[in-house]
Amino acid sequence: MENKACETVCGKTCLVTGGGGSIGSELTRQLAALGAEKIIIADIYENGAYDLKCAIGSAVRVEIASVRDYDRMKRIFAEYKPSLVFHAAAHKHVPFMELNPEEAVKNNIRGTEITAGLASEYGASHFALISTDKAVEPISVMGASKRICEMLVYEKSQKTASTKYFTVRFGNVLNSNGSVIPLFQKQLESGVLTVTDPDVTRYFMSIPDAVTFVLNALTVAEGGEVFIPDMGEAVSILNIAEQVIRDADREPYKDIKIKFTGLRDGDKLTEKLFYDFEKPEKTAVERLFRVQGSSAAELGAAIKELYRMAAEQDRDGIRKIMFKITG
């Protein structure tokens, strides 16, 4: 599908929110390789964006901006009028969002609503939301916020014919910022690796593979879908920890200990890529499935209430509404 992705991307102006992050930076690299004319990185964190600008050069324009800032994002859309919008900006760390649910509302949900709304207002042909398997039957604030983002994008797709809105949902990404393997490698120095539970498993894929699936989904999107790549079998986190130790020429449990710390608030033992009601269908892209998007009754009213509660820092109220919407 690379040729079709090239046809879709070549000569276009692209906007990547969270462009300095793990997924956003790889998106930027692959978009440049496919011949995008301009790639606008919108990111509040300047260091990652700076490194990417230095690596890629004149095709990349950096705009230091928060997706929760409507006026700033509107100015970016008005100036560049991107054809392709990739929304990768989000708070993703489960424990932090459990402690700060108002930030998940403001950054993840409000940021998605702002960016998705501006995409159609300024004539984008495609809008892609980057989501997570934690959005499926969520028990965490982060997962629930991303599920609400999926719903927002689906509802937008039903109201806007000119812009193709879709979501790409995948599991953990190897070697992304904050992921488990770099953490284990750093913990080797202390002599103790920490695993939450001996039975915990996760789905994994590489950063380049995840981004390739996003760009291939672009070529088959009709609007309103959630695309899910075939991520193979879920992997034991304990097995990964043991392998990291062996790769360092050490022996698990002898040279390096493994300590079980217990599941954190919002953690699951296992993740799912699909809801039970979703019916995966094959696409023209190998190992890429699609399901029809879905939403919840009175989503708009519930989100307005979430915004009010976020402003008031009503954390218990936020959790209650989030899990009511996504339950």
Image (spheres, grey):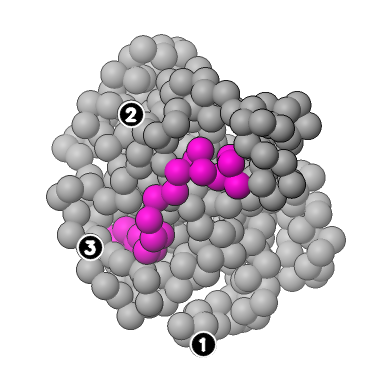
Which residue lies at the image location 60% right of the left edge and 47% below the top edge? 243
What residue is pinned by disc 3? 280
What residue is pinned by disc 2? 139
Badge count: 3
- In the displayed structure, does residue 4 sit left or right of residue 191? left
The crowd level at tag 3 (other Cα within 10 Å; few <14, some 14-19, many 20+) is: some
From the top left corner, tell me how far across and down residue 112 is, in percent: 45, 44
Q: Inspect the image, locate mark 2, and give the three-letter code of the amino acid beneath it.
A: Ile
Disc 2 and disc 3 in contact, CB within 8 angstroms: no
Disc 2 and disc 1 in contact, CB within 8 angstroms: no
**Start-end of magenta stretch:** 224-243
Q: Secondary structure at mark 1?
A: helix
Q: Nearer the viewer, mark 3 or mark 1?
A: 3
User: Rounded to the nearest whole Å, what is the CA distance between mark 2 and mark 1?
Assistant: 40 Å
Image: 5 above or below 197: below
From the top left corner, tell me how far across and down residue 227 is, in percent: 35, 62
**Is residue 146 in view from this perspective?**
no
